Image (cartoon, rainbow, N blue to C red):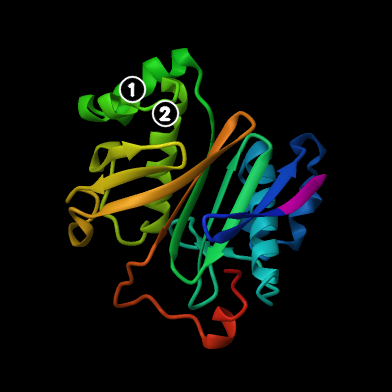
Amino acid sequence: MLTSHFPLPFAGHRLHIVDFDASSFHEHDLLWLPHHDRLRSAGRKRKAEHLAGRIAAVHALREMGFRTVPGIGDKRQPLWPDGLFGSISHCATTALAVISQQRIGIDIEKIMSQHTATELAPSIIDSDERQILQASSLPFPLALTLAFSAKESVYKAFSDRVTLPGFDSAKVTSLTATHISLHLLPAFAAMMAERTVRTEWFQRSNSVITLVSAITRFPHDRSAPASILSAIPR
């Protein structure tokens, strides 16, 4: 599959972005993935997206001296080396990955059309959140896409700790030209209730990318060895 890769510093992290041509994908492209058998029943588009995401993740890991491919967990989540956290996302012809010593979540979404935003808004935000989005200087479709994406990023950062969150378990409290803040409710996760999480964002062409990096650690979170921490870009 034809791909192009470039790293991009953002919000104190280094994103690894892979643009890919899904039409050039071939089944044998998956063979270098140790878990390729688990993708046997996936559709062609899904296989291409998964491959691009893992390519981005491999670039991120190699930057720190790891020559491994993240596997697939029992909840289909990427499996990272002990002591590290990571996140993968893809949309259309772009995939990206990021690695951190802290919990991290990343998401990329195509900016909604006005029609789609009007149709989906009630399932993503409530009336209070709508007022916040409309009070920002951003067009409503962009603002709503950011709300959707930010909630996805927060979920990814804490996916192993949440119960069964919906979009109503994290509320938008502010939106600026660089960040969007979310207030977490008990429905998200009891141990994280009433916390506010700041998510950074930027626009890339007709998509938005959101990133949340949380300093919160839990009892079973393993710290990365010093040799790993020294290699993580600051």
Q: Secondary structure at mark 2?
A: helix
Q: Please state the horizontal and vertical placement of residue 26, each as a whole percent of the image.
A: 80, 44
Q: Which mark is residue 143?
A: 2
Q: Which residue is mark 1?
A: 134
Q: Please state the horizontal and vertical placement of residue 85, each as a whole percent of the image.
A: 49, 67
What are the residue bounds of the magenta stretch?
1-6
Point out the tag, 1 or 2, that comes first from the N-terminus. Answer: 1
Residue type at mark 1 is Gln
The answer to whether 112 is drawn above or below residue 95 in the figure is above
Residue drawn at x 33%, y 71% is 217
The answer to whether 91 is drawn above or below residue 52 in the figure is above
Going by the image, does 229 lie left or right of 50? left
Going by the image, does 68 lie left or right of 193? right
Q: Please state the horizontal and vertical placement of residue 61, each as a whole percent of the image.
A: 65, 68
Q: Main secondary structure of the magenta part?
A: strand
Q: Please state the horizontal and vertical placement of residue 115, each as a whole percent of the image.
A: 45, 12
Residue type at mark 2 is Ala
Residue drawn at x 35%, y 61% is 160
Q: Secondary structure at mark 1?
A: helix
